[in-house]
Amino acid sequence: MRERQILHNRTRFDGSEKNVKRTLSGGAVVAACVLALAGCAAVTTDVQVSGSPLVLQGERTYAIVQTPTQETGTARQQYEALIHNELGHYGLVDRDVDRASYMLSLAYDTRPAAVGVTVGDCAGSACNGAAQPSFSLFGREYQHSMTLRLFEASTGKEVYKVTAISRDRNADTLHPIPWLVKSAFAQFPFNEYGSWRVKLRNASDAAAQPEVVTVTQLDR
């Protein structure tokens, strides 16, 4: 009787071990799929541009200004470093506030996104006026945004505004920074104002910034 009980317990243990292995194996497959998507898929951002026709007058100098309510931290430091780099490519020079011809304000945000169904170039929330519920095997989706506003230092007039938006399933505020900045400066200024879609990819050099693949105007 005792031997029969031991055999029964061993059979139950073997079955449980197989179930654990099967579960771990399935989890590994899902994790591998997620990593593959993250590593291989291109990143697409939406860019909204507005303002008056931008013709930089006088000395092409600027200063990034910060309001008293804005925090200073790692995210802002990374944004500003990349913005300085991009503006330098367009011949603009960073100066102290009292010596700059233009003031540049920076705002950014990460929040849970209400996800709509995308059809062609039209997202569900934009086409139907209401976002559709999000159903995802991989969890909640987040929206990352960055807005830059350019003002004439002498008049305080806003002459250019660009907002870049991306979505993914990562709540981290730092990882989208290079993609948002590169999208906002895919053109500077953009050829026409309105809505644009920018497709990017990782640079071949791991240390380099993302590369712009296509820039498409959506308003036409």
Image (cartoon, rainbow, N blue to C red):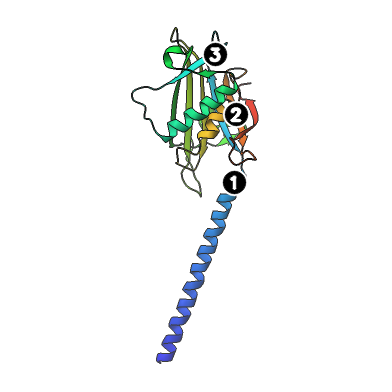
Residue that carries the numbered disc 1 in the rendered image: 39
Q: Is residue 189 above or below residue 134?
A: above
Nearest to N terminus: mark 1 or mark 3: 1
Name the residue at 50% across, 64% down: 23
Q: Position of residue 188 (x, y in %)?
A: 59, 20
Residue that carries the numbered disc 3 in the rendered image: 60
Q: Is residue 64 above or below residue 59?
A: below
Q: Is residue 115 above or below residue 149?
A: below
Does any portion of residue 164 appear in the rendered image?
no
Residue sitting nearer the eye, 147 or 70: 70
Residue sitting nearer the eye, 78 or 165: 78
| Measured Cα–Cα span from mark 3 to mark 2 | 28 Å
Corner quadrant of residue 38: top right
Residue that carries the numbered disc 2 in the rendered image: 197
Residue type at mark 1 is Gly
Nearest to N terminus: mark 2 or mark 1: 1
Question: What number of labels is visible?
Answer: 3
| Measured Cα–Cα span from mark 2 to mark 1 | 21 Å
Element under label 2?
Answer: strand
Quadrant location of the C terminus? top right
| Measured Cα–Cα span from mark 1 to mark 3 | 38 Å
